[in-house]
Amino acid sequence: MDSPSQPPIPHTAPPSEPALPFSAFTAWQARAAAVASGLLLAAAFPPLNAWPLVFAAPVPLLLAVWGTRRRKNSSPAPPENPVGKDGAALPAGLGNKVRTGFLAKSWRRLGGWFKHVFWTGFGLGWITGLVFFTATLWWVQYVTFPGMLALCAYLALYPALVLGVAAWLGMKPEERWLTALGKTAVLTGMWCGLEWARSVALSGFPWNGLAVPLFPLHGLRHLSAYTGVTGLAAVVLLPSLWAAAGLRLRRGRQRRKLLATLGLVLAAGGALEWTATAQDARAMESAAASGTRLHALLIQPNVSMAEKLSPDVERQSQRYFDLAHQTDVALASTVGAGGKARVDLVVWPESAIPGFFHDAVAGGAFAPQLEQGDFTLVTGADSQEWGELHNSVAALRRTVGNHQLHDKVCLVPFGEFIPFRKQIPPLEWMLGGLIPYDFTPGRSLEPLKPEGQPFDVVPLVCFEDTIGRHARKFIRPQPQVLVNVTNDNWFAESPATDIHFVNARWRAPELHRTLVRSSNTGVTASVSAVGVVERIPNFQEGVLSTDFSTGDGRITFYARHGDIAAQAAGILALLACGGVWIGRRRIVQPS
């Protein structure tokens, strides 16, 4: 008897993994994400100052770099039996030469290299960098539009390199959380190392680092005394990398472990912020009770560039008289019982007086102000010695004969000198009319020591207050104050003054010294060692009357060792990349 037939077992496909929302980007979606990251990061800077966005800005870019679909190579393979124009088969030897000649091999290798995944990430990173730097440095066009484009395109290369490495390392959906942590650590170290490299390469341009907008965070200000603002980029990038990696990982357990690590780090950061805030409050109370604070008047004359460059001698003389009158009024407001101004420091901006310093002294400048009190007058002034032109800062005490001069060390390329002016004649032809004479850089890294004052002056001219590696070289184990004289009126009423200031204010906590700034059009401000900011509005005449502390002479780790944290991170990242490259070659080509 036949057994009853069994009903067929229906065939069911294994359940498929749910598609991740950020697992794949088309080329245009990836470019849009790169633009979005650049705009979000720019929004963290002036004029918007939406600094929390700095943590979210890298995430779209990272997801795009790790999730962009690579186009398959559609170029046809070389024919097995090559033929000539008439359809006849070519001799075997000739065919081999066509396919394997040196030029053909080199061309194929070059094409293969540029199709490498590294260049996908590099291109997206460059787009983000170009959008970000253009959105925050567009005001350079007031001096030179081609120069602005070239500067932004150059600066965009640094994030492009990091994102190229990010694409090369990859972040697979099935990645283990420890592997993801290792890759994010490598990328963080590389970013920090490249921010340091950007601050020294081609004369250096350290502006607008990743951590620069985060000055409101007390904990980061404390950390900057060890790492500098360059090293703080790790604090921004690591959470962004972990968040992006968490969105990429498919396996729930691995994702939970990674996000738990992120949660622990954020909790530690919150504890650091709470502790640092309490410490700063106690430090301010202690400084107020000690009675060791001094008083400064920071003058903002608000002179336009047209007035400053006017060839009219009477107009230039009036510019000086207006500044002197503004100072006299400010000094009169501080006069005490003895009939003398009760002030310790008066600061005028960069190139505050017309002509050269020694000519102004011979013409009777400064003396009327110095007679009104026992204070130090610090002013920016051009000086000339032995045929060399210098952008200088002078410190005068009691009499005009008792003065010290310091010449600016870090000059602005194409602003204060033309590189290779004599070696490349076209540069002279194009820019000689704009910059008729080159300034000569100074060599001294000694602070100014006004006679009889209980503090030294660390002289920082113009954008030197944005270069931590330069400012730290003046630090000595004694009471000091950082004094910056600057003139940002080249860039009209743009965000240039505020962007300059947000970069400069980090010098105070990094070096544990008060920073006072006198700027022609702004930002005229005072920043205490614990980060308390006092300022007056930009683009108007004004005087900031402020108390300041000269500190106890403590030298921070950063002041002593500089950007060693960022340098070490960059070196370790390079070594790690080398190890990954060797390991992958061994897997592909086993011995």
Image (tube, helix red, strand yellow):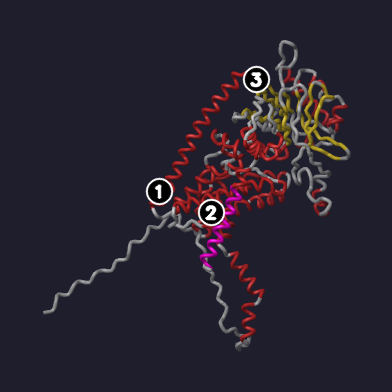
Query: Which callout, 2 or 1, points to the residue nearer the camera?
Result: 1
Tell me if 575 is positioned left or right of 433 in this view.
left
- Residue 360 pos. (x, y %): 85, 29
Q: Is residue 585 magenta?
A: yes
Q: Secondary structure at mark 3?
A: loop
Left or right of 95 in this view: 371: right
Task: From the viewer's perspective, tell me whether residue 458 is left or right of residue 90.
Answer: right
Tell me the SS state at disc 2. helix
> Mark 3 or mark 2: which comes first in sequence?
2
Q: Which residue is mark 2?
A: 32
Q: Quadrant of residue 114?
A: bottom right
- Camera-near label (3 vs 2) is 3
Front position in the image: 445 or 367: 445
Q: Of all residues shown, which one is farthest toward the top? A: 337
Q: Earlier in the sequence, mark 1 or mark 3?
A: 1
Q: Which residue is mark 3?
A: 292
| Distance of label 1 from label 3 (alpha carbons) | 53 Å
Task: Say which residue appears at 71% left-offset and 22% top-offset.
Answer: 454
- Residue annotated with mark 1: 256
Q: Earlier in the sequence, mark 2 or mark 1?
A: 2
